Image (cartoon, rainbow, N blue to C red):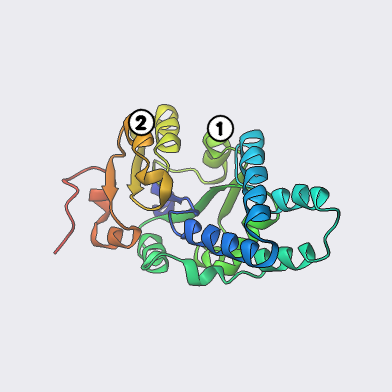
Amino acid sequence: MTVSEEVVFLLDVDNTLLDNDHIGSDLSHHLAQEFGGKNRDRYWDIFETLRKELGYADYLGALQRYRVETMNDPRLLMMSSFLVDYPFAERLYPGALDLLAHLDHRGRTVILSDGDVVFQPRKIQRSGLWDAVKGRVLIYLHKEHMLADVERRYPARHYVMIDDKLRILRAMKQVWGDRLTTISPRQGHYALDQKNLTAYPPADLTVERIGELVKYDLPALLGIVDTRPTE
């Protein structure tokens, strides 16, 4: 294996590199402003129903369903623009791009995300994350079930997965075992949900903020030495 194939760093997007909760709050405010609180709440009801059906967040899909209920309200045409043209780069967590550059000198960085085929790529592109990983982006419906494909595309001796969802980290650990180091930033509602913290084992390394990881050297990230930040 080449040096870049020794280690592959896999990074989630939503609430890992990008503050998706903030984006959701902005969308909620915009919906209330344009359509009122009742219609805003109905959109989120549809959104959650669709999330349960699909297993991932589909903002544009929820908008399509909402459109059927509202009898083709022409204002919804501008709602799609709000989502597609949203300034995602402004919602990157502090240090996110610095971390990608830091890790890229120590292995290959790959975005590994769940989502739809339109909005999720758009979000990754407009945030600057696509270019930061030189186009190494994988988006699946359920990424934890696609590890064989990940390994085929990006073979490595060892993987590091950075994700806010302990459920995902556990599922991947069950497949890759000691070949995987899991890292969880305590960002977003999933990472702070006490039910999730109780239901799933902790990651190999937990940090408060994604930007803190630039303080850790490669052996620490792989669990070879104590995971204490360098001075």
Residue nearest the viewer, comparing 29 with 20: 29
Q: Residue at x 60, y 37 (%)?
A: 55
The crowd level at tag 1 (other Cα within 10 Å; few <14, some 14-19, many 20+) is some
The quarter holding residue 73 reads bottom right
Q: Is residue 111 left or right of residue 180?
A: right
**In which quadrant will I find the C terminus?**
bottom left
Q: Is residue 212 left or right of residue 180?
A: left
Q: How far from the left and from the top, in percent, is residue 79? A: 71, 64
The quarter holding residue 161 reads top left
Q: How far from the left and from the top, in percent, is residue 12? A: 47, 50
Q: Is residue 101 left or right of residue 81?
A: left
Q: Indicate which disc, 2 or 1, sits on the residue closer to the N terminus.
A: 1
Q: How far from the left and from the top, in percent, is residue 65? A: 76, 47
Residue nearest the viewer, comparing 128 with 76: 76
How many marks are shown on the rendered structure? 2
Q: Residue at x 41, y 63 (%)?
A: 100
Amino acid type of the residue that numbered disc 1 sits on in the rendered structure: His
Disc 1 marks which residue?
Answer: 145
Residue projecting furthest to the left: 231
The crowd level at tag 2 (other Cα within 10 Å; few <14, some 14-19, many 20+) is some
Residue 137 seen in the current view = yes
Q: Which of the numbered marks, if any, corresponds to residue 76?
A: none
Q: How far from the left and from the top, in percent, is residue 7? A: 39, 48
Residue nearest the viewer, comparing 59 with 29: 29
Residue 124 seen in the current view = no
Q: Residue at x 58, y 59 (%)?
A: 28
Q: Residue at x 50, y 53 (%)?
A: 14
Residue projecting furthest to the right: 71
Q: CA distance from mark 2 to mark 1?
A: 18 Å
Disc 2 marks which residue?
Answer: 200
